Image: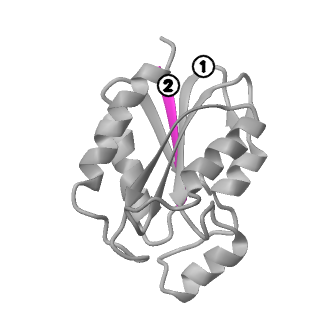
Amino acid sequence: MKTVVVYESMFGNTRDIARAVAEGLSEWSSVSFADVDGADEHVNADVSLVVAGGPTHAFSMSRSSTRDDALSRGALSATHRGLREWIDDIDLDAPVPLATFDTHVTQKWVPGSASRSAAKEGRRHGFVPVAAESFYVKSTQGPLTPGELDRARTWARGLRAHVRS
């Protein structure tokens, strides 16, 4: 099986979650791993699952203005293209399952998240959303809440149930 992991990260926390997800996936799938700038915009028919994640900005996926704001707050990097733009530009050979994840500051329920927004946007572009998960950071810049990397690996292992063999 082939799985693609695509992520957007500004402070490094979402990248770290994406790596942990890729580790969990690699126990049962061949994994390609890329940030949104390096990710292919074409998903071949032989891909069994796409996992995409990014930080939650203003209850959704980042926008150019929120990425600029993150830079002004000390982000390690921000690109002109985020997860939202990658999904908008995607070209699928066939419908493919999509699992989404995000990072955000609180463990309380919030009215929106990047993972839910990405799943909704992904459906509009031909993906079949199968799972969405949030992982938590202590503050905007991090660090991750203890245990989140292990939780990301466990979540990724469970994604196998959403993929046809």
- Residue found at the far top of this picture: 165
Q: Residue at x 66, y 26 (%)?
A: 44
The image shows residue 148 at horizontal and vertical percentages of: 29, 54
Q: Is residue 146 visible?
A: yes
Front residue of this view, candidates 134 and 110: 110
Q: Residue at x 58, y 72 (%)?
A: 78
The image shows residue 98 at horizontal and vertical percentages of: 58, 34
Do the residues under discs 2 and 1 have CB atoms within 8 angstroms?
Answer: yes
For residue 64, side relative to residue 13 (left or right): right
Q: Residue at x 50, y 25 (%)?
A: 2
Give, as a three-letter code, the residue at label 1: Asp
Q: Is residue 40 visible?
A: no
Residue 58 among magenta residues: no
**Which image quadrant for residue 41?**
top right
**7, above or below 127, in the image:** below
User: What's the magenta region?
Assistant: 1-8
Q: Earlier in the sequence, mark 2 or mark 1?
A: 2
The main secondary structure of the magenta stretch is strand
For residue 74, side relative to residue 94 (left or right): left
**143, above or below 165, in the image:** below
**80, above or below 122, in the image:** below
Q: Which mark is residue 2?
A: 2
Give, as a three-letter code, the residue at label 2: Lys
